[in-house]
């Protein structure tokens, strides 16, 4: 996106604070969606419990595949734990994967309220994140509709991916985490967000299509 477009989005967000926050307009909707993306727009892998131990049964189920991709990318390191030979007595050993120093810039402490890209779990923990959603522009909107005491609007917008990690573009990582290329592709399409009017202004709900 060009610098001019980026400045236009930023200006719209800033102007929302100066206008009537209850007015249904592009500036207020941009401000609402921007705040929502700041809260839950982090794009993470959903691997929150570190270190991760993988035993024989898990390896046979293919659990280790995604971890191997991250190890190749240099983000984690695998070490055999326990006694016995890893090949002669595989059921007596587990492989423990820990984060490396290269992963530190991508660690995000995720509160319980945030969604997971991979698992959908709401449990807190340290996650590896490869980017974040950022509002590009408001495309259109319909409404607002009045439902009793409530007013809602259906906003169409587009986002871009900011701070994208280079390792997220590696073929082995995208193969292990197919959500990554899908999310990148969706960034070029229109998205829908329901916004509602609160006493302090327009807010974006958690439901997004």
Image (cartoon, helix red, strand yellow):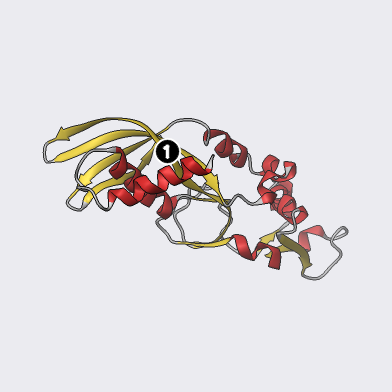
Frontmost residue, 190 versus 6: 6
Looking at the image, can residue 27 be seen? Answer: yes
Residue at screen point 42% across, 43% down: 8
Give coordinates of residue 45: x percent, y percent.
Answer: 58, 51
Image quarter of the N terminus: top right
Task: Work out which residue is located at the far left of the displayed protein and give it.
Answer: 148
* Quadrant assignment, res 111: bottom left
At numbered mark 1, what does the secondary structure look like: helix, strand or loop?
Answer: strand
User: Seen in the image, is 8 located left or right of residue 97?
Assistant: left
Where does label 1 land, which residue? 137
Task: Work out which residue is located at the far bottom of the displayed protein and give it.
Answer: 83
The crowding category of the residue bearing disc 1, from other C-alpha atoms within 10 Å (few below 14, some 14 to 19, many at least 20), is many
Q: Answer above or below: position of 157 versus 127.
A: above
Residue at screen point 42% across, 49% down: 37
Give coordinates of residue 189: x percent, y percent.
Answer: 49, 30
Q: Answer above or below: position of 198 versus 147.
A: below
Give coordinates of residue 128: x percent, y percent.
Answer: 59, 57
Frontmost residue, 186 versus 121: 186
Give coordinates of residue 47: x percent, y percent.
Answer: 59, 55
Frontmost residue, 61 versus 166: 166
Frontmost residue, 85 versus 41: 41
Looking at the image, can residue 94 be seen? Answer: no
User: Seen in the image, is 45 located left or right of residue 68?
Assistant: left
Image quarter of the C terminus: top left
């Amino acid at each position: 996106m060009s610098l001019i477009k980026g400045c236009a989005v930023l200006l719209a967000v800033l102007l929302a604070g100066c206008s009537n926050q209850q007015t249904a307009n592009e500036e207020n909707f941009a401000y609402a969606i921007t705040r929502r993306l700041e809260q839950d727009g982090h794009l993470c892998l959903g691997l929150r419990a570190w270190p991760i131990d993988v035993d024989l049964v898990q390896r046979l189920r293919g659990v280790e595949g995604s971890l191997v991709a991250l190890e190749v990318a240099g983000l984690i390191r695998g070490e055999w734990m326990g006694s016995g030979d890893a090949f002669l007595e595989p059921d007596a050993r587990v492989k423990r994967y820990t984060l490396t120093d290269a992963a530190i810039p991508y660690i995000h402490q995720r509160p319980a309220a945030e969604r997971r890209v991979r698992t959908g779990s709401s449990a807190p923990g340290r996650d590896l994140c490869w980017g974040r959603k950022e509002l590009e522009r408001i495309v259109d909107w319909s409404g607002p509709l009045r439902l009793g005491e409530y007013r809602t609007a259906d906003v169409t917008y587009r986002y871009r991916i900011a701070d994208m990690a280079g390792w997220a573009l590696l073929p082995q990582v995208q193969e292990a985490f197919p959500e990554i290329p899908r999310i990148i592709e969706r960034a070029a399409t229109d998205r829908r967000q329901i916004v509602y009017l609160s006493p302090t202004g327009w807010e974006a709900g958690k439901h997004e299509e």
